[in-house]
Image (spheres, rainbow, N blue to C red):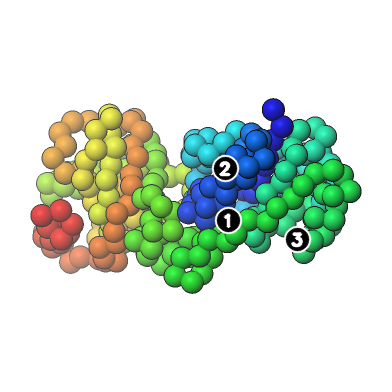
Amino acid sequence: MSKIATIGFFDGVHRGHRFLFAQLHEHAKHHQLTPAIYTFDRHPKELLTGQAPAMLTTHDERKSLLQNYGEVHFLDFAAVQHLTAEQFIRHLHEQEDVEVLLIGYDHHFGSDRLKGFHEYEKIAHKIGLHVERAHECLVDGLPVSSSRIRKLLAASQINQVNRLLGYNYTVSGIVEHGNAIGATIGFPTANIRLNSAKQLPASGVYSVVVQANGVEYKALANIGTNPTVGNDYLSLEVHLLNFQGDLYGQQLSISFLSFLREEKKFVSLEELKKQITEDIKMSFV
């Protein structure tokens, strides 16, 4: 069946993206076409500038989220980056059976970097493909964008991040051995192996929910260098409330709920223990 398609990188699959996909499905019903989402295997900036921004979603996370909204097609950006807008639209029409292209309100594509929607419209008409422009999604009077969410993450504004995403920001990783200091003060922590491509929230202490072995646990997360014990590297550690057992080598999923405080150096482990007790009371009691 012929398709109506939209295209973008869709990092985070946030509320703005889902607003676009809702329009895609409305148009699909109107035109009696199959809704399809075209995206890229790598962020375009990785190839164009040599440096991609830190991702809100890994490749697998993005794929899993996108599959809720239509057929998902991953394109090799290296293979299409030199195509002009006309060549790319022709490829979609002739090779991918796309009859209608829904363009995001501020989206641009093609090596010739056309700016106006009417330019795309004129090219598509010549090829025999129809283009339509999507409406933008505003929250608090501003467009929802991945770059806006990244800035909020870097500023510890996790509540705003979750509001713009439409779900709780989540980081996953394997539990590895740490220095076991937490266990000596009654608050054992799981040290998470970090994914260098995924953006962490800013350093500090957060209330989180952790999924382990298919069970959800309330937890505290600390992002930082643990200055009280003198680490010189960035780490993510989580203390699961009411958990007994061994988590080494297991995959944990950490969903951030709220920012509690900045990381600080305590004069003693006893002072750190008192503060963690207060953090738990503030979050969950």
Between residue 224 and residue 167, name the one nearer to us: 167
Mark number, residue 25: 2
Where disc 2 sits, the SS reads helix
- Identify which amino acid the numbered label 2 is placed on: His
Q: Kindly indicate the quadrant of the structure image that contains residue 180.
A: top left
- Identify which amino acid the numbered label 1 is placed on: Pro
Mark number, residue 104: none
Q: Tag 1: Cα neighbours inside 10 Å, few (<14), some, or many (≥20)? A: some
Q: In this view, does 264 lie to the left or right of 101?
A: left
Q: Who comes first in sequence, dot 3 or dot 2? A: 2
Q: Who comes first in sequence, dot 1 or dot 2? A: 2
Q: Is residue 232 left or right of residue 263?
A: right
Q: Kindly indicate the quadrant of the structure image that contains residue 279.
A: bottom left
Q: In which quarter of the image is the N terminus?
A: top right
Between residue 214 and residue 279, name the one nearer to us: 214
Q: Are marks 3 and 2 in contact (CB under 8 Å)?
A: no
- List x then y, in percent, for residue 14: 49, 52
Residue at (15, 60) in percent of width and height = 282
Note whether residue 121 is visible: yes
Q: How many labels does the image show?
A: 3
Q: Do the residues labelled 1 and 2 touch (CB within 8 Å)?
A: no
Q: In this view, does 27 lie to the left or right of 96?
A: left
Residue at (70, 53) in percent of width and height = 132
Front: mark 1 or 3: 3
Report the residue marked by disc 1.
53
- List x then y, in percent, for residue 25: 57, 42
Report the residue marked by disc 3.
117
Residue at (52, 56) in percent of width and height = 16
